[in-house]
Image (cartoon, rainbow, N blue to C red):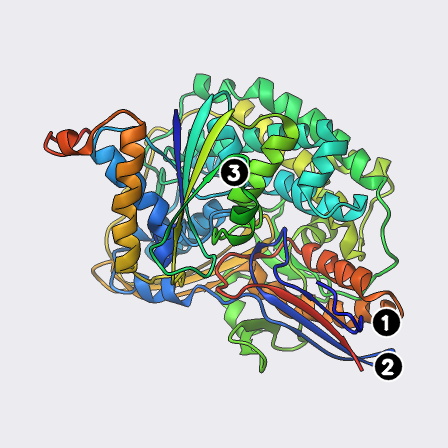
Amino acid sequence: MTTSAGKTIRVDTLARVEGEGSLYIKYAGEQVAEVKFGIYEPPRLFEAFMRGRHFSEAPDITSRICGICPIAYQMSAIHAMERALGIRIDPAVRLLRRLFYCGEWIESHALHVYMLHAPDFLGYQDVIGMAKDHREVVEKALRLKKIGNSIVQLMGGREIHPISAAVGGFHKVPTKSRLRELVEDLQWALEASLETVRWTATLEFPNFEPDYEFVALRHPEEYPFNEGRLVSNRGLDIDAEAYEDHFAEVHAKHSNALQSVLRARGSYLVGPLARFNLNFDKLPEEARQAALDVGLKPPVRNPFKSIVVRAVELVFACAEALRVIREYEPPAAARVEAANCAGTGQAITEAPRGILYHRYALDENGLIVTAKIVPPTSQNQKRIEDDLREYATQLATWPLEEATWKCEQAVRNYDPCISCATHFLKVVIERE
Amino acid sequence: MQILCCGNRHRGDDAAGLLVADRLREWGIAAEILDGEATEIMEAWDGADSAVLVDAVVTGKRPGTVHAWDGGNLKACSTSSASSHGLGVGEAIELARALGRLPSKIRIYGIEGRQFTAGAGVSPEVEAAVEVVARAIAQVAGADPATVASRQPTE
């Protein structure tokens, strides 16, 4: 809704962001005077809810925090518990866990690239408007997402929140033939993802390249999902155990939300751009070549190009899923039994939108004494605010309505998952 | 007829749709549970001639108010859904319509909620509304709750 004076624009809900939140930008003349972004509150209630529960309950409880990335939540919890209890998992179980991640990434990236982010670039208010003119594109997105979902369903075994994953392995593992049923669809999905890379590369991108500190997992052999050291382009190189020595959550003055910062250097960026820039050499050949063919190589600093990087990660996820299915031999046992013991465990995994940190302390009966969860959107929140401060300067002379839309798009670059927030999102730009 | 119930059990009144599903299942009526994300709703009703969908909503009315919208008139729903996702029930309907994937008959029950905080319980007004909606759907589904309720719950 635009006010008659044209000086203030309010958008009652920021569509196409998972959840709700608020963004406020104030100009003094053509200078950006103030930016406040506080959409996301970390899942403190879930942390409290887990205290006193047995470690084996954590995967189920954490999978309910987010409807979009339940697997990343539950797998971070499982990995942290396995470290606390000193459990080593079967290599076949590890492989299956990678397949599980592939499913979630395909679902999440297909949804964001096509249904949430693409309308911005094509000039549509939302995917509904876009569907009328680009029906085949939306149909492709729906099919891709469904294929990701079919992996999650096969591995997860229950509606909405997957429960099959457990501390030590899975409650039940699939047969080789059951996995092979996915191959035909995944081959289609791989081709569709390659087309997606080519298609997203043709979109127009604003000229905007902040000097980010990128933070992502890095593994010696693989593009990262569930294991590796936490590294950055400014020398960070730590084990998950040291996460809290280097990162802190600080209270933003303007909201209840916590903003994550690197203690030494402030805001940082997690998610597709960070993973791509720090792990380009670990992408499978077809994904790396697809990126190079459209002129995409590290470092990619333009956050609007995250849509192309997500498409490259779609190629990776499909290729990786096919590799896992090819190599899979069922483990001797679905799960290693875990005995109760006291301990502390930290783990970091890569959710579609970036790293997700969990820490748990257990007592000698295996009961949770403390739990801490730092989700990706919490980690990116300060960086989104910093982006908007820089980007809003470019928009100072733009008509307010367009400037507002551009700011919304800049927030959507991060695919923020703010379903835990309880506020309605309002974007407000004021000019003095 | 496809019965789809959306919500989140851990966010106060957002559980309304799922509680309706629980009730229907107790009476032996099949109801699918979803979190309210648009594309999954569209997959769930794909190929069905008629569908009933239940979700919590916020329109500013008294908590526990039961809204019923028929397929043609869902604008109200799309702006009011309290679903925790950007593309929710309203968008599922509009997108399905744009793609020609909307069941020919569709009815939405919206249960007005009051609180959606993570970890909150369900408001008593909403619990009462859940019963009203479950009974209404049971009747349309051809089952009389008065008879089925006395039978053993179906596994």
Q: Which mark is residue A396?
A: 1
Confirm whether residue A242 shows in the render: yes
Question: In which quadrant is the N terminus of chain A drawn?
Answer: bottom right
- Choose top left, top right, bottom left or bottom right for residue A404: bottom right
- Choose top left, top right, bottom left or bottom right for residue A430: bottom right
Mark 3 on the same chain as mark 1: yes
The mark nearer the N terminus, 3 or 1, is: 3
SS assignment at label 1: loop
Which callout, 3 or 2, points to the residue nearer the camera?
Answer: 2
Q: CA distance from mark 3 to mark 1?
A: 45 Å
Circle 3 sits on which residue?
Answer: A98
Asked if labels 2 and 3 touch by Cβ distance under 8 angstroms, the answer is no
Q: Which mark is residue A29?
A: 2
The mark nearer the N terminus, 2 or 1, is: 2
Asked if labels 1 and 2 touch by Cβ distance under 8 angstroms, the answer is yes
SS assignment at label 3: helix
